[in-house]
Amino acid sequence: MTQSVTELIPGLPEELALECLTRLHYTAHQVGSRVCKRWRELLQNRDFYYNRKKNGFTHKVACLVQSLPVQTESGSGKRVGHPKYGVSFFDPATRDWNRVDPIPKYPDGFPLFCQVIGSEGKLVVMGGWDPVSWEPIKDVFVYEFTTRVWTQKKDMPETRSFFAAGESGGRVFVAGGHDESKNALNSAWVYDLLKDEWTGLTRMSEERDECEGVVIGSEFRVVSGYGTESQGRFKGSSESFDMESGQWSRVDDTWKASQCPRSCVGVGPSGDFVCWAGSDPEVRVGVCGVDLGDMTLVTGSAYQGAPVGFFLVEKKQGQHGKFVKIDVPVEFSGFVQSGCSVEI
């Protein structure tokens, strides 16, 4: 009699077979998903992801929106065309560098100034500017590391640039930024990846353009930013959205006023914000910090025009340790615009 359900691994009990697949390294998931339909469905299953996470078989990688190597004219050395960006990812466990495939809709480079967020083992890309026309876009894309395939999702409800974003439990929160007319925004939304739905949230008390988003526990914190009439004058306050009550609260004196928070906000051991820009003489300009759990990847330059340095900062007994410079292949040594961690 033919079995109606294919065994995960022929000859092994279901529980043992599941344990084996749980231990499969994420780099083998693409090949594993081709074995059979059951393996493919399992490897992409949300519950399977959380089971791997619960048992300690996931780990964080850094995904960086990074300038791609530029073409130059022979002889003159002049750059050809506009700068193009891709997404590189760095595995701190193996020190390997790789690059995510281009988004099919944008084969010549990722949207400029797009937001990248990690959620349940996936990479989410939102908004930004069309890399050719430089027009603001509302596109949302999700990259599945298991299959290495991009999927376009429901557009953002509003066009916004330079906004804050953060993730919790398969939901991405966005707030602030500015619209197509450069007006700073105080509106906020939440996107549910599983349902592919956007839901409006209550507004912040203030407009916050060029703000930065951080999730701490059940709070989505929107750090600094400025209003329409105070262009470039960054606030020293932040606003905190309580995911349980659905309400915002303003928190004063959480950031250095006049300091741009974009991509350089870290969280200290006591929950206070840390600015990675200027935290070391080698990282003063164009700084980006990505929290990887027990360490942080920090990139930046000592001065305008200096080469980009890449550093790992370990956390020891709740404190940030020394900056340790790491070697990076030349094709991954370009300027880092922004980044996030993805727990795969």
Image: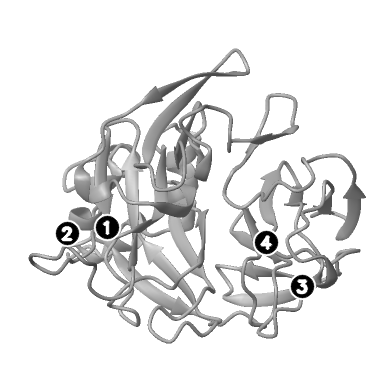
Which residue is drawn at the image coordinates 37% and 36% (left, top)? 309
Query: Is label 2 in contact with label 1 (beta carbons under 8 Å)?
Result: yes
Crowd tier of the residue under label 3, counting other residues whose Cα lies within 10 Å: few below 14, some 14–19, many 20 or above: many
Q: Give the amino acid at mark 3.
A: Ala
Which residue is drawn at the image coordinates 32% and 51% (left, top)? 334
Q: Cα distance, mark 2 to mark 3?
A: 50 Å
> What residue is pinned by disc 1?
39
User: Which one is in front, 107 or 91?
Assistant: 107
Question: Is residue 202 placed above or below 262 in the rendered structure?
Answer: below
Name the secondary structure under disc 2: loop
Q: Which of marks 4 and 2 is nearer the N terminus?
A: 2
Looking at the picture, how far across and down is residue 102, in whole percent? 29, 70
Looking at the picture, how far across and down is residue 324, in whole percent? 40, 22
Name the secondary structure under disc 4: loop
Q: Cα distance, mark 1 to mark 4?
A: 43 Å
Crowd tier of the residue under label 2, counting other residues whose Cα lies within 10 Å: few below 14, some 14–19, many 20 or above: few
Q: Which of marks 1 and 3 is nearer the N terminus?
A: 1
> What residue is pinned by disc 3?
184
Q: Which residue lies furthest to the left in this view?
A: 75
Q: Which of marks 4 and 3 is nearer the N terminus?
A: 3
Q: Earlier in the sequence, mark 2 or mark 3?
A: 2
Q: Give the amino acid at mark 4.
A: Glu
Which residue is drawn at the image coordinates 70% and 79% (left, top)? 182
Which residue is drawn at the image coordinates 17% and 43% (left, top)? 11
Q: Cα distance, mark 4 to mark 3?
A: 9 Å
Q: Earlier in the sequence, mark 1 or mark 4?
A: 1
Depth check, mark 2 against mark 3: the one in front is 3
- Residue 210 numbered mark, or none: 4
Query: Is label 4 in contact with label 2 (beta carbons under 8 Å)?
Result: no
Work out whether residue 344 can be spotted: no
> What residue is pinned by disc 2?
35
